[in-house]
Amino acid sequence: MKITSAEFIISNSDVQKCPNEPLPEYAFIGRSNVGKSSLINMLTGQKKLAKTSSKPGKTQLINHFKINQNWFLVDLPGYGYAKVSKSTKAVFQKFITEYFEKREQLVCAFVLIDIRLEAQKIDLEFINYLGESGVPFCIIFTKADKIGKVKAQQNIAAYRKKVLANGWEEMPQHFVTSSLDNFGKDEVLTFIDDVNKQ
Ligand code: GTP
Ligand code: MG
């Protein structure tokens, strides 16, 4: 699928104020700095559509981007940002959980994981939360340009083990991407296209 248009529509922290058109949407979630906003820019081919930063905590709101005038990509704030006080660090922001629990247009969430890191407790908790909430999701391993192909496969195999040990019967569908060199772009867009056609 080719993205021919991508436009920013609205930012907010209130699920009720998200666009009310009945169009399918795909949300990007994961730890702060994992590369959610960069991935949206990579997929749309627009370097400055979503705001990115080398410092974690850049995206603070729910951001809707309308694609090809008939579906949405949604950029969300990260979780697990260390500057948040310890007691609230492990708690996912209320408007984020509301988004996942109430947003009927959400057809699939992409949970982003930095491919270099060992499985983090907070990501496993979030995956479990999505499972318990009945939200369809895929995993996207990001920043693949930072490690070699062999190491990437080893890390994914280790991740799979952790996911299975965490109660899942199988590894969720997953993709490997790099926003630096467009790696994985076609796979993610083909997946979205297939879901849109269902
Ligand atoms: P928050 O909005 O703070 O939750 O972060 P985010 O997940 O949206 O991350 P963002 O896209 O802002 O990227 C964070 C940093 O990682 C930036 O410095 C990006 O340039 C860098 N980055 C993102 N994706 C990649 C990638 O695929 N490869 C490399 N090498 N760097 C990346
Ligand atoms: Mg961001």
Image: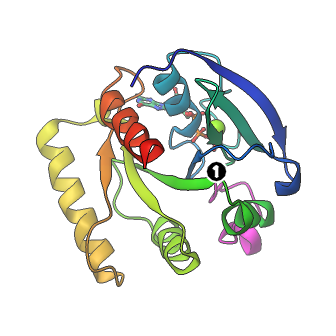
Task: Please identify the quarter of the rendering in which residue 60 is found.
Answer: top right
- Identify whether 76 is placed above or below 146: below
Q: Residue at x 53, y 15 (%)?
A: 4
- Residue 65 in sight from this viewpoint: yes
User: In the image shown, does 170 or 120 lie closer to the viewer?
Assistant: 170
Q: Which residue is drawn at the image coordinates 65% and 41% (left, top)?
A: 75
Q: Which residue is label 1 attached to?
A: 78
Ligand 2 visible in quadrant = top right
Q: Would residue 112 appear left or right of 19 to someone viewing this image? A: left
Q: Residue at x 60, y 48 (%)?
A: 32
Q: Is residue 172 above or below residue 182?
A: below
Magenta-highlighted residues: 79-92
Instruction: State whether residue 52 appears in this view.
Output: no
Q: Position of residue 120 (x, y in %)?
A: 44, 65
Residue at coordinates 70% horizontally, 43% vertically from top-left? 57
Badge 1 marks a residue whose secondary structure is loop
Q: Amino acid at mark 1?
A: Gly
Relative image position of residue 13 (x, y in whole percent): 85, 51
Q: Residues within 10 Å of mark 1 (few under 14, many from 20)?
A: many
Residue 19 in the image: above or below residue 174: above
Taking the image as shown, residue 170 lies to the left or right of residue 19, namely: left
Main SS of residues in magenta: loop
x and y percent of residue 197 in the render?
Answer: 43, 43
Name the outermost residue toward the front: 198
Determine if the magenta segment contains residue 144. no
Does residue 86 sit above or below 195 in this rendering? below
Query: What's the colour scheme?
Result: rainbow
**Is residue 83 part of the magenta span, yes or no?**
yes
Task: Out of 82 and 196, give the one closest to the viewer.
Answer: 196
Is label 1 within 8 A of ligand 1 (CB to nearest ligand atom)? yes
